[in-house]
Image (tube, helix red, strand yellow):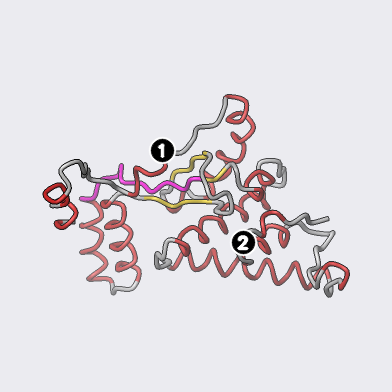
Amino acid sequence: TDLIEKLPRLFPDAKVEPFSAAELPQSFEELTLDERESVFPLIRAAELALQPFRCDVAVKRFRPKEVPTLYSEETGGAFRREVERAREESDDLYASVMDSVLSGARASDRPVLTLNYLNPVVRKLTGVTDRALMKLSVEMLYVQALLLGHRPLSAKEMALLNHGLLGLIAARLEGGGGDPGRGGMHWPRRTGVSRWMSCWLAPPGCGTARPR
């Protein structure tokens, strides 16, 4: 940071300003009024699903479209997250110390999960009417965003990941083996869970797949 601030000394025309990762979603393209109405059920479901993690939700357009979500937080939010993880791993005495630290942290330092309206998986998710499937989908998108941001998972977030992976395994076992005519990828007709999760666990670009 100190070196960057000194850049104008070498390049007088260079302009240096402080930048926070939490400010990045503010530069994303907003949705139209009709689009906002169409994604309202998704936003509401996502807010309820992520309420235990004190995470806000937004839907905007940004590129690359292969990225379905972006997790962003202020410096204070990152500090709170580290304290909460330390509390989970400490004994009762140390946990009480962590509670006092958390009580002094600003409640406004909430992270934001921004869903990418350009991403095919997110677009399909806006049309899902199954509440259980939508909740599971949001939870998995949340965990994926944390992993893509190289953030360590808390105990509750690890539980979400385990729940989602078990859901994928159960869906595959229920659907049976793969179909060679589909490149070895089988899309069970009896459940939609694996359709979403297969895309999240596959490399970027899987969102363009056309499950039957």
**Above or below for 80 versus 120:** below
Which quarter of the image is occupied by the N terminus? bottom left
Mark 1 → mark 2, Cα distance in angstroms: 25 Å
Which quarter of the image is occupied by the C terminus? bottom right
Q: Quadrant of residue 203?
A: bottom right
Magenta-highlighted residues = 104-114
Q: Residues within 10 Å of mark 2 (few under 14, many from 20)?
A: many
Task: Please give left or right for residue 55 compared with residue 210 in the image.
Answer: left
Instruction: Name the residue rendered at 43%, 48% in the picture.
Output: 55
Residue 169 on the magenta span: no
**Residue 169, how many percent across, how many down?**
70, 72
Task: Please give left or right for residue 210 compared with residue 9 in the image.
Answer: right
Q: Main secondary structure of the magenta part?
A: loop
Residue 112 on the magenta span: yes
Instruction: Name the residue rendered at 65%, 70% in the picture.
Output: 166
Which is closer to the viewer, label 1 or label 2? 1
**Residue 11, how many percent across, how many down?**
17, 47
32, 89: nearer the viewer = 32
Instruction: Name the residue rendered at 27%, 52% in the picture.
Output: 75
Q: Which residue is mark 2?
A: 200
For badge 1, the amino acid type reads Ser
Q: Residues within 10 Å of mark 1 (few under 14, many from 20)?
A: few
For badge 2, the amino acid type reads Trp
Task: Please give left or right for residue 74 compared with residue 178 in the image.
Answer: left
**Residue 67, how many percent across, how many down?**
55, 53
Q: Which residue is mark 1?
A: 27
200, 134: nearer the viewer = 200
Compare marks 1 and 2 and give the one earlier in the sequence: 1
52, 191: nearer the viewer = 191
List the single residue furthest toward the top: 33
**Above or below for 96 versus 117:** below
Tell me the SS state at disc 1: helix
